[in-house]
Image (cartoon, rainbow, N blue to C red):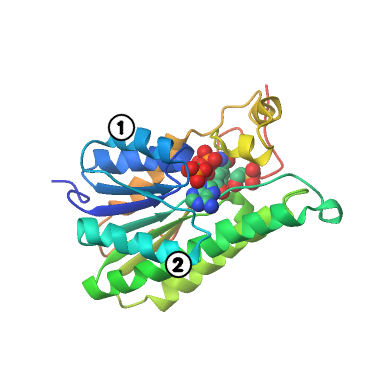
């Protein structure tokens, strides 16, 4: 029996990309998986891929009260939450600070930082009460280095990294593990969202290089989650072989 057999995983932002691949990978490992996101039809599609045990909860993580209710609903459905994957997140635009858009900034901060906090705050008491659990936050290489046009996105991911580090210290002795998985370029809907549906511009981000797929990141998440309970993988930074830093990529 695998380490995750029968465990309950809650994956936010599971309607596409890394979250979707993670939900599928965790179900394959034997998890009972709860998935959240805003697009209902997409949630249903992913649930169909996961099988009859999946629990679907429509959620905008920016809604503090509904995030707490969603955590309660997952607990109500499955009886516990053993693994929380805080994956919901996005970038909007690629603008210098001097020409930044207030709404884009607000959406990134409210989703990537506040949304992660709402879900995490509601989940910790459940994990504390059961004496174990694992919180995996999806950060980014942008949590380690900023780049032109990425100030606020990078600020949110630096924030995720800070929260991850603080959580690991706050939860010491509780049996709750805390990990961050920080990817470089992953070809998902991320760039399409960042560039407001401009498919050509989104495609150009990955042109001439071999990016990661959501599944590559999901494998890192599964690796961290399947270590023995005395092993905490603090941080995984994973990039395409064609990427050396946020701004250095090899294109052929
Ligand atoms: P996608 O755009 O493919 O997926 C993003 C997911 O987040 C979707 O399921 C979306 O669901 C969900 N989401 C966005 N906003 C909200 C919200 N307010 N409430 C609930 N769910 C939300 O991108 P990725 O899979 O690439 O992104 C996943 C995570 O990985 C993000 O945190 C991103 O910052 C991070 N990341 C991505 C990298 C990349 O290169 N792609 C690299 C490093 C990190 P819906 O729209 O249905 O709500
Ligand atoms: C997403 C990777 O380089 O676009 O976190 O910021 S990057």
Residue 94 x/y as whole percent = 75, 44
Residue 70 x/y as whole percent = 36, 59
Q: Assign a secondary structure to mark 1.
A: helix
103 on left or right of 34: right
What label sits on residue 49 in the rendered view?
1
Which residue lies under the disc numbered 2? 65
At x 55%, y 33%, the residue is 187
Q: Assign a secondary structure to mark 2.
A: helix
| Quarter holding residue 27 | top left
Q: CA distance from mark 2 to mark 1?
A: 29 Å
At x 43%, y 76%, the residue is 169
Residue farthest to the left, as pictured: 1
Crowding at dot 1, Cα within 10 Å, few <14 / some 14-19 / many 20+, comes out as some
What label sits on residue 216 in the rendered view?
none
Residue 193 x/y as whole percent = 62, 39
| Total marks in image | 2
Residue 189 against residue 229 in the figure, above or below: above
Residue 199 x/y as whole percent = 66, 27
Quarter of the picture holding the C terminus: top right
196 on left or right of 29: right
Q: Which of the marked residues, 2 or 1, is nearer the chain's N terminus?
A: 1
Q: Is residue 182 visible?
A: no
User: Is the CB of the residue bearing disc 2 within 8 angstroms of ligand 1?
Assistant: no
- 130 or 50, which is in the foreground? 50
Residue farthest to the right, as pictured: 98
Q: Name the mark nearer the viewer: 2 or 1.
A: 2
- 69 or 195, which is in the foreground? 69
At x 66%, y 25%, the residue is 207
At x 64%, y 47%, the residue is 91
């Amino acid at each position: 029996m695998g380490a995750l057999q029968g465990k309950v995983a809650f994956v936010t932002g599971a309607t596409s990309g890394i979250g979707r691949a993670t939900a599928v990978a965790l179900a394959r490992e034997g998890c009972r998986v709860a998935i959240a996101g805003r697009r209902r039809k997409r949630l249903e599609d992913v649930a169909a891929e996961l099988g009859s045990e999946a629990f679907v909860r429509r959620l905008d993580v920016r809604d503090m009260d509904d995030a707490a209710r969603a955590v309660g609903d997952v607990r109500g459905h499955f009886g516990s939450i053993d693994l929380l994957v805080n994956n919901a997140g996005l970038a909007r635009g690629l603008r210098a600070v001097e020409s930044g858009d207030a709404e884009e900034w607000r959406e990134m901060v409210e989703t990537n930082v506040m949304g992660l906090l709402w879900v995490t705050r509601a989940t910790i008491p459940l994990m504390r009460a059961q004496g174990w659990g694992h919180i995996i936050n999806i950060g980014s290489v942008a949590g380690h280095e900023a780049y032109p046009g990425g100030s606020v996105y990078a600020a949110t991911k630096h924030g995720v990294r800070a929260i991850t580090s603080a959580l690991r210290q706050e939860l010491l002795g509780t049996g709750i593990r805390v990990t961050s998985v920080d990817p470089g370029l992953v070809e998902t809907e991320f760039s399409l969202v960042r560039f407001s549906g401009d498919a050509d511009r989104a495609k150009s981000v990955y042109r001439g290089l071999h990016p990661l797929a959501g599944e590559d990141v999901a494998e890192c998440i599964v690796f961290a989650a399947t270590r023995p309970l005395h092993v905490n993988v603090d941080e995984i930074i994973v990039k395409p072989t064609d990427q050396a830093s946020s701004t250095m990529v090899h294109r052929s």
